[in-house]
Image (tube, rainbow, N blue to C red):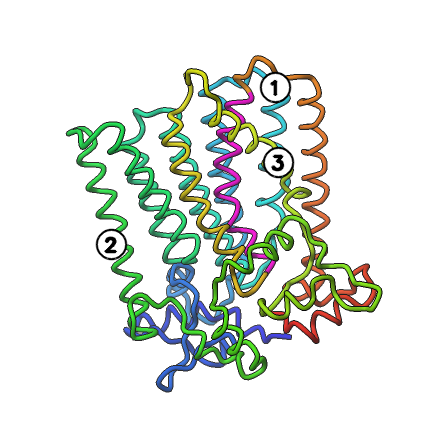
Amino acid sequence: MRSDNLLLTFNSMMDHMLHGRFDVDPYCVQKEGFLRNGRVYAYWGIFPAFLRLPLLVFKNGLHLDITRLSCVLAACCTFLVNYGTFLFLRTYCGFQKKWLENSLFLVLAFSGVQICFLQATLYQEVCLWAITFGSLFVYWAVRACLKPEDTHKALIWMALAAGLALLTRVTMGIALYAALALFLGGILYRQGLKTRLLAPIMASLGVVGVFVAITAFVNYERWGNPLTFANYNLYIYNADFPDRLVRTEQYGLFNIKRIPLGLLYFFLPVWAFLRADGEMVLQDEYQRLIDAVELPPSSFFLTDGFLLFLSFYCVKSLLRTQANNGPDKLMVGANIIGLSTAPLLMLMAISMNFRYRAEFYPLFLFMAFMGAVALDQSRDVKIKTKHISIILVILSVIFSHIILVLYKMGELGPAYNFVLSGVSNYYKTRFGFR
């Protein structure tokens, strides 16, 4: 069990940054820290630390734990941004199919990204804010794809969202940067460097450049290398799990060999079952390649089935061969490819943690929003499509709340008595949950 001091890590980070340092107090970060040259550093981005600035107006304000408040604020911001995208779609296409409009609102408000991660921990705070910036990026990406005249504004906001994500959670930031780069490439390919877009393009490049410079400076101060985001050879937790250094040396922090295991973890969690001999399904492969496999088992097919269903319509519209009267397929495809970067990294990651599902949502949301437009404008929608959608919405809401309850029953997921006998204790002793 971790001390509550861990929740004050960003407070300590802010305090030290005010004095020109980027380390944190060891008693706060504890074993989650990285020991370098006699100082302890955290690997999290610095954005959440800046949320502690208002605490300076209070006496001893940096001793106040606002993790829960920050998590609630991030969740509310995410919903408001996604609701803004929903309202834009309603204005854009009018939602001729009212069941589609109602279904989309319900899943945005009561399932998936809005429900599954509502736990007040330091780890979740970072992920929740990363989701917020990912959703902001998606909002403007959707606007730019459906309403090209908004592209000049969208570029600035997309750059800002990508930069803030980079200062929060690097994998999300990389994905948004990749999507923005591909989107800019698509614009230049389609339109060339027109005078009207020259200013917003240069401004967006300036914005992303500033955030890259800030991130590089923080990395250099922490690790002595502007391109290093975390040096796991210095991870204090390695003392408890010495096998992790060996595994990292052999396979790295990201490896394509983990993709099949990642797909099972995020989409088809058969790994949660035990074989007749009492060992975990695929135990040898997980133990060889992965540091930690975190409970609860979950599947996007259950918590976000309707978003995936709409994503199918997005892909279907992109593959359609007849004349396209909708959004530019190149621009939509550029965003999809770029936003796929974060999910791909999570499929290859050395740890499979529940909160890493957050990285998938900007991709799912973008594709679902574009798919909703394609589905609403389709003239050959069968009645069974409506029935399937309603069923998927109901399942998404129900399972999102079930998973949330299971997740909150233990510290970061694993420490509860799961229905499969012996699984929780087995995982804790064999896979070193964090």
The residue pinned by badge 2 equals 210
Residue 428: image location, x then y, percent: 69, 72
- Tell me the number on the disc at residue 98: 1
SS for callout 1: helix
Task: Using the rendered view, name the quadrant where residue 431 is placed.
Answer: bottom right
Tag 3 or tag 1, which sits nearer the N-term? Answer: 1
Tell me which amino acid carries mark 2.
Val
Amino acid type, residue under disc 3 in the picture: Val
Residue drawn 54% across and 76% down? 244
Secondary structure mostly seen in the magenta stretch: helix
- Which residue in the rendered view is the most extreme toward the bottom? 38
For marks 2 and 3, the one nearer the N-term is 3
Residue 372 covered by magenta stretch: yes
Q: Are marks 1 and 3 in contact (CB under 8 Å)?
A: no
Please, what is the three-letter code of the amino acid marked with disc 1? Lys
Q: Which mark is residue 107?
A: 3
User: Residue 277 versus residue 208: which sits nearer the camera?
Assistant: 277
The stretch in magenta equals: 353-375
Which residue is located at x 28 percent, y 38 percent?
A: 185
Screen quadrant of the N terminus = bottom right
Q: Is residue 90 magenta?
A: no
Q: CA distance from mark 1 to mark 2?
A: 44 Å
Q: Element under label 2?
A: helix
Name the quadrant of the C terminus: bottom right
